[in-house]
Amino acid sequence: MIFFAIRWFVLTLAIMLASYMLQGIVVQDFFTALFAAAMLGLLNTFFRPILIVLTLPINVVSLGLFTFVINAVLLLMVSGVISGFEIRGFWTAVLGSLIISATNWLLSSLISDRIRIQRHSGGSHDGYIDMKKRDDDRWE
């Protein structure tokens, strides 16, 4: 549960950063960015996989770059629903989705719920153990 809240906050920070970097993205205040991040998270969860499957041939030909167009469309949809969150133009949405994706990836990689432990025995590397943190703050 705590990782869900952290990822939501990271997405909120990514939206705020995009609004500071691009003049075409306007965020009224922090709470507007928080609601926009929640809406974007819902759209990414439910609609993004469907859109990626529907546009798979274009995505393959563009080597995955069309994903940024899908993200831009979802960002424009969020700006249409959340008052105080405005995106002026399609290309601003594409650049904004690129900034949001990169920032979200960077911050999420710093705050990971997985660790990798390298096993050693007798001076040789026997492999890796992947561990994931559970909701009760224990590792499995």
Image (cartoon, rainbow, N blue to C red):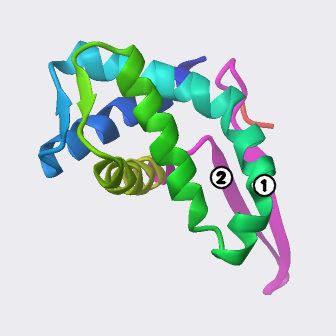
- Under tag 1, what secondary structure? strand
- The earlier-in-sequence mark between 2 and 1 is 2
Picture quarter with the C terminus: top right
Residue 43 rendering spot, x and y as whole percentages: 59, 27
| Amino acid identity at mark 1 | Asp
What range is drawn magenta here? 108-137
Q: Are marks 2 and 1 in contact (CB under 8 Å)?
A: yes
| Amino acid identity at mark 2 | Ile
Residue 2, placed above or below residue 95: above
Q: Residue furthest bottom?
A: 124
- Under tag 2, what secondary structure? strand
Residue at x 79%, y 48% (from the top left corner):
54
Give the quarter of the image for residue 25.
Answer: top left
Q: Nearer the viewer, residue 76 or 114?
A: 76
Q: Nearer the viewer, residue 124 or 109?
A: 109
Residue at x 49%, y 41% (from the top left corner):
73
